[in-house]
Image (cartoon, rainbow, N blue to C red):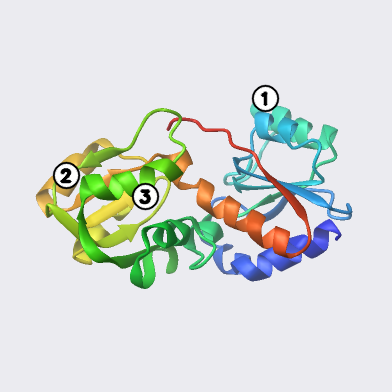
Amino acid sequence: MDCQTICDRLDDELDVPAYAGVDPSPNGLQVGPATRTVDHVAVAVDAAVETAERAAAADMLVTHHGIIWGGIERVTGLHHRRIRALVDADLPLYVAHLPLDGHQTLGNAARIADLLKLVDREPFGTDGGLPVGQRGRLPEPVSVDALCDRLRPHLDTGGQGIRTLAHGPDEAQEIAIVTGSGADFLGEAAAADVDLFLTGEGKQKLYHEAKEQGVNVVLGGHYATETFGVRAIADLLADWGLDTTFLDCPTGL
């Protein structure tokens, strides 16, 4: 399959154009060539020198975090190193940032909701009027520790573990999820009257905000909570007849 066809199909599946005015990351093909024939796609969370070098045996790299954030003024330093790693391997880079956060079946939050077997699910967390997460209800209430036990085998935290802020009910049933750097959505979670808010990484203010609003918080790690979406993309690409490889590069953050 040619690269442009894959990009067009992913753009359509992920509704990439809808996020064009919202996302600081330009989604879609960030580095060409679009004309390359693709049989094998590597997927990873981050477009870094390491992932580009490890993907050199593939024909295309798909990541959640790209190499462009708000534009590039000069191709020097880190930008040069990352672009050079892609160009040296003649490796197209396709990026899906907020579209992969907000997708209600393939997205990071959606796949964590699948793992937790949440029901009555709906979009949660909006950026520019578009969803970036998901909320739902556990079939039965569970303790925060029990919920973390369900998550732990599936979160590659680089040995750092899962952190919790137990400021809500002893047992949680209503869950909201925004992966990665989702701490700013705690207020929306509290307004939605959820018992527990699951995100990747925290901020200093999160402790008191969660305590004052009576919401449990689970911090599963930015990297760890965002492996789910690119794995889902790999499954989709495999359904299209392509070979895929997931490049795991845990950061512990």
Tally of numbered discs = 3
Q: Which amino acid does label 2 sit on?
A: Ala
Residue 131 % position (x, y): 43, 66
In this orientation, which residue lies closer to the viewer: 95 or 127?
A: 95
Quadrant where the image shows the N terminus: bottom right
The answer to which quarter of the image holds residue 219 is top left
Say which of 80 and 151 sits in front. Answer: 151
Q: Which residue is drawn at 31% across and 60% down?
A: 176
Q: Where is residue 47 in the image (x, y as percent from the top left)?
A: 64, 39
In the displayed structure, would residue 247 be above or below residue 172?
above
In this picture, residue 97 sits left or right of residue 7: left
Nearer to us: label 2 or label 3: 2
Name the one closer to the observer, 115 or 200: 115
Residue shown at 36% from the left, 71% from the top: 121
Residue at (64%, 69%) from the top-left corner? 13
Specify the quadrant of the image occupied by residue 196.
Answer: bottom left
Q: Is mark 2 on a helix, strand or loop?
A: loop
Q: Quadrant of residue 137?
A: bottom left
